[in-house]
Image: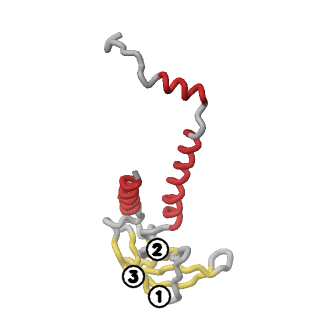
Amino acid sequence: MLKAIIPFYIICLFLYVFFSRRPDYQDGEFTTGIIHYIKDSNQKSVPKAIFQLNKTQDTIYAGYPLRHVEEGEQVTIIYETNDASRAAVYNWWGYWLQWDEILASILIPFVFLYVAKAITAGPDPEALLNELEMRNPPKRRKYD
């Protein structure tokens, strides 16, 4: 059964990841940006990617868990042509693979498996007896 489920799971995960990215990979445009550490409202330095489009300068958040970017590093940015503020740093970790989706895609099947086992474990003796009686139900006419 696992031989059938695992390829189906991988295909579904691949299709979800490919078609759920925002900005969209098929319609998005690419440009380059420079990483600068800017202080936020809590006076903490956060990485921001600064890029320029049509003589306007935009800034996006470039930090992501388990990904380190350095000051002055040049990065590739993907953005939507109609709304450049919806941009993202184009990288495997952070654009294609996101930690919350990976964690959810691992935990959800285990939770469903646990729930299925909890529901079907230890059936009531009366329910077992009813199930055994219904193995050979009486034959009825098609249009009774």
Secondary structure under the numbered disc 1 in the rendered image: loop
Which residue was labeled with disc 2?
93
Which residue was labeled with disc 3?
32
Tell me which numbered mark, 1 or 2, is placed earlier along the sequence.
Answer: 1
Q: Residues under labels 1 and 2: Cα distance?
A: 16 Å
Comparing 83 with 14, the one in front is: 14
Name the residue located 67 percent from the left edge and 79 percent from the top edge. Answer: 43
Secondary structure under the numbered disc 3 in the rendered image: strand
In front: label 3 or label 2: 2
Q: Quadrant of residue 56?
A: bottom left
In front: label 3 or label 1: 1
Residue 127 pos. (x, y %) = 56, 27
The amino acid at mark 2 is Trp
Density class for disc 3 (Cα within 10 Å; few <14, some 14-19, many ≥20) is some
Q: Residues under labels 3 and 2: Cα distance?
A: 17 Å
Residue 61 pos. (x, y %) = 52, 74
Name the residue located 41 percent from the left edge and 22 percent from the top edge. Answer: 136
Q: Residues under labels 3 and 1: Cα distance?
A: 10 Å
Residue 49 pos. (x, y %) = 48, 80
